[in-house]
Image (cartoon, rainbow, N blue to C red):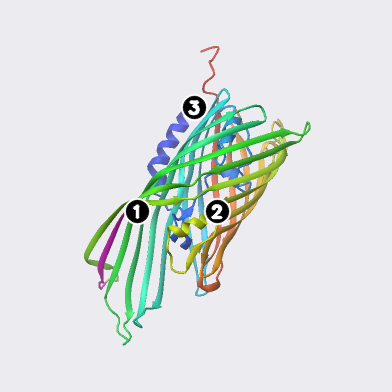
Amino acid sequence: MIKKIILAAALASFSNSFAQQGTASPYSYYGFGDKHFKGSNEIKSMGALAVFSDSLHINTLNPASYAKLKTTTFSMGASYKGNNLENQSGKEKTTSGSFDYLSLAFPAGNFSVAVGIMPYSFVGYNIQNTNINDQGMTEARQYIGEGGLNRTFLGFGYKINKNFSIGVDGAYIFGDTETSLTKFITDNGEGVALDRGTRYRYLNNYSGLNVNAGLNYQQPLNKNLTLYASATFSPEMKLKNDQEKIKSTVKLNSSGSLDEIDSSNEMAENEKMLLPTNYSIGAGIGNHLKWFVGAEYTSTQTSKYNSFYAYENASYNDYMKIGVGGFYTPKYNSFTSYFQRMTYRAGINYENTGLIINKEEIKGLNANVGLGFPVGRFNSNINLGFEYGQRGNTNMGLVKENYYGINIGFSFNDVWFKRRKFD
């Protein structure tokens, strides 16, 4: 039955989900866009910790966790997000939805194998502003961006002994983005507006490889307590970008839309874009299948973006995130109460994105809670999560985001490679 579910879900996801717009944030203007969380929804509900692993769920943040799996596990997830944007001029509401991940993993002795696909980043913004140019004219600008990158991966985990495992993911990152800048003179200094302007469009096609390695250590302290520790590392790599630049003269027609009068294009192939070094270190303590609490530190060398991107009034420091979270399952094998078999999750994380705009650091705070509903055999489960967070501020003309989200994930477990005694 689970194989039929996998086939149907995979076909539906591949044909429909990647067309969705996963962000409406003005901060997706920078870099590759809004970086998408690359873990499962149940891990996200625990503060996005790579340190925790068990035999029931695929933790794609740390490939060493694959070695813990005891059954073939299929997982997929999707989310909906609402965003309230605010600056010194006013407020605006946006919504977005996305496919989050599709993954499959299975054990093979001390080895485990995982494969999957998920978004890597999203671009989605529509920004308008006016300013006085060097000639004293009032110039209106509109910035529009859409598209994103995807990540498909193949990973291996290996159990060195009952306490220690290692793993590695090899990922192929690919995708397209389209961004544009349109300029119009709304006042030429003499009170006259011009009906013609200039539009610059950039069509980007990205592709390249990424590697993520992980360590996982679990040490029983006594009958009821286990110590958890983990580390992950992704070395610096580069993506290839084939870009087409199109410059057009546009005219405002009577209906208020733009007509293209003439255009010219230029190709820039095999440009290299940086994927910076990333690492995480985490630790926690818990009672197996009962409860867990942990903390994790993550860092990315985004300061190296300064050599690849040149923005007006914007630069980068290194990215940093601290997360704390855990779960509680009252009694996973209860025969009398479904609520005692459910899993209750919560987590919070703070991040400094590394992005600096108008000398203001863009920071964020995110809180999550989640519920795990057991279904079927082999401890399969449905995971429902809720999040609320803030990013940025309204200083120096910036935008503050207050967002909320609902996500759902499915984790199905089955035994595929065990020979049956009876047909």
Give the residue drawn at x 30%, y 81%: 193
User: Does residue 59 show up?
Assistant: no
Please give left or right for residue 209 compared with residue 362 in the image.
left
Q: What stretch is highlighted in magenta?
A: 242-254
Q: Sequence order check: which comes first, mark 2 or mark 3?
A: 3
Please give left or right for residue 148 compared with residue 42 in the image.
left
- Secondary element under disc 1, as helix, strand or loop, is strand
Please give the residue where the numbered disc 1 appears in the rendered image. Answer: 204
Give the residue drawn at x 42%, y 67%: 127
Please give the residue where the numbered disc 3 appears in the rendered image. Answer: 1
Q: Distance between the residues labelled 3 and 1?
A: 41 Å
Viewer-nearest of discs 2 and 3 = 2
User: Does residue 131 show up?
Assistant: yes
Q: Residue furthest bottom?
A: 190
Please give the residue where the numbered disc 2 appears in the rendered image. Answer: 405
Q: In which quarter of the image is residue 117?
A: top left
Q: Where is residue 227 in the image (x, y as percent from the top left)?
A: 72, 37
